[in-house]
Amino acid sequence: MTDPTPGPRGTAHEPSVDPWKGLRGIMAGTLVLEAIVIGLVLTVIARLDDGAHFQPWKVWFVSLLAIAMLVASGLQRKPWAIPMNLTLVALAVAGWAVHWSMGVSGLLFATVWAYILFLRRDLAGRMAGGYLPSQHD
C-alpha cells in the first residue's frame, strides 16, 4: 500500500465532498438558461418583418433545440454529457440560419462553455495536486 502524495497542506486524500457535483450543477444551470434564451428566439422570428421569418422548419428547429437543452440539463451525470453539451451549443450557433440573433446567442453561450471547460480542467488539476480544501478535512 502506498501513501498518498503530500500536497501543499499536508497529505491529501480523496475529497470528502464531490467537487464534480458543483460543476455538474453549473452545467445544468447553463443549459436551462440557454434553453430559455433559445426559446425566446421564437418571439423574435414571429415579430420581425411581420412574421416573414416564422417558417415551420425554423419553429421546429428552435423548439426541438430548446427542449433538447432542457432534457440534457438532467443528464449531466452521464459520461457523454460534455460532448452532448458541445453539440447542442454548436447547433445553437448553426441557428444563424434561423436568424442572426440566434447565432449570436449561440456564440455567447459557446464562450460560456469554453470557460466551463477551463474550470473543469482546472478542477481536475487541483484534485490531482491535492489543492482542494476538502482533501484535507
Image (tube, rainbow, N blue to C red):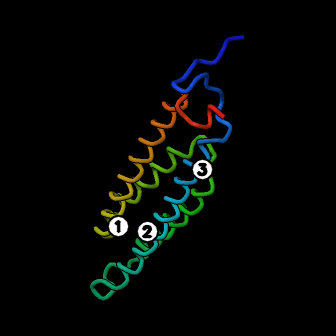
Q: Is residue 102 above or below residue 78?
A: below
Residue at the far top: name it.
Answer: 1
Who comes first in sequence, dot 3 or dot 1? 3
Task: Residue at 30%, 69% (x, y): give it.
Answer: 101
The image position of residue 92, as x and y in percent, is 40, 60
- Tell me which residue sits at (45%, 36%) in the image: 122
Q: Are marks 1 and 2 in contact (CB under 8 Å)?
A: yes
Q: Count neighbours of disc 3 (C-alpha within 10 A) and say few if under 14, some if 14 to 19, many if 20 or more.
A: many
Q: Is disc 1 placed on a helix, strand or loop?
A: helix
- Hey, which residue is sitting farthest bottom in the picture? 50
Q: In the image, what residue type sits under mark 3?
A: Gln
For mark 2, give the secondary structure.
Answer: helix
Q: Which residue is mark 3?
A: 76
Instruction: Quote the CA–CA distance across marks 3 and 1.
Output: 24 Å
Q: Which residue is mark 2?
A: 38
Please give the residue where the numbered disc 1 appears in the rendered image. 102
- The amino acid beneath tag 1 is Met
